Image (cartoon, coloured by chain):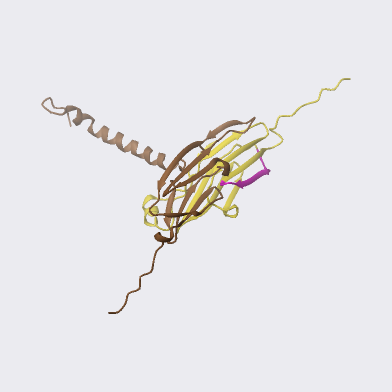
Chain colours: A yellow, B brown
Amino acid sequence: MQTQEATRKPRHESRSEAVQTLRPIAPPVDIYENEQELLLLADLPGVTREAITVQFEPEKLTFEAARVVGDQTVQYKRVFTVAPIFDADRISASYERGVLRLTLGKSAAVRPRQIPVTSR
Amino acid sequence: MLFRLDDHEPFTAHFGPMEDFRRRFERVFEELDREWKPARAAAPLFADRGDAIELTADLPGVAESDLSLTLNQDVLTLGVKRVVAGPEGYRPHRQERAGFQATRSFALPCRVDPEKVRATMENGVLTVRLAKAPESQPRRVSVNVA
């Protein structure tokens, strides 16, 4: 799994509008995997559940959130390249105590399967 | 330019441009590094709300039971602990979220009313509102025309 650049603007551009929009912050993330799924935990303090967007495209997972601190808006964003082994229908997200929790279920083709042995 | 024997700084003459290149090259990485590094927890912030002092601190994933707040005269002490344990049966790929345990004391800029301290945790953000003591409240002074 690789991290991709959040969003990159030419330096001069980002500097000129530094007052209005700050560069997105990359929140710290933990990633765990087992045979069934991939689990991602991200620290996103101070945002509301509605302000979080999680987007899954084949091989690309993005989450972002906006947070208002005083008179500034802080943007959180992270993009990950993921192996094409996840089932888009088996992705779930929850947010509790400032931590976003994403689970990506692996598609049936890559999940280990127990094959029963029958006798004849 | 060729290397001259009488050059006082032969090393710099030869390697100066290289050194310069190396420095620039490293700066590129420093820049990248800065962008890539996951954000660290912001330091607690204090704000003066007129009749109260407000402390806000980002504490994602911290349970209320792992927080302790004590007020002693005009010193507020915040103790906090976060245990980041990987879930059972999972293999870690990336662990950027650090666990921590810390105690910090803050000297408040004025007397506060110990009976009127309210602390709330919402979406991983701790907010402590300390109402100022009556003598520290802002007072309006009227200007009289002589």
Is B100 inside the magenta-drawn segment?
Answer: no
Q: Quadrant of the N terminus of chain A?
A: top right
**Residue reaching furthest to the top:** A120
Q: Is residue B72 left or right of residue B94?
A: left
Q: Nearer the viewer, residue A34 or B117?
A: B117
The part of the image, by quadrant, that contains residue B5 is: top left
Depth check, front residue: A60 or B143? B143
Look at the image and give the residue range highlighted in magenta: A86-98
Residue A71, horizontal then vertical, whole percent: 45, 59
Residue A57 in the image, given as x and y percentages of width and height: 61, 46
Q: Residue at x 62, y 31 (%)?
A: B90
Residue pictured at 66% horizontal, 45% vertical = A92
Seen as rendered, the residue at the extreme left is B6
Q: Nearer the viewer, residue A36 or A41?
A: A41
- Residue pushed farthest bottom? B146
Where residue B67 sits: x, y (%)?
53, 42
Horizontal placement of B128 versus A100: left or right? left
Residue A3 location, x and y as percent? 51, 39
User: How many marks overall?
Assistant: 0
Query: Is A93 colored magenta in this rendering?
Result: yes
- Quadrant including the C terminus of chain A: top right
Q: Main secondary structure of the magenta part?
A: strand
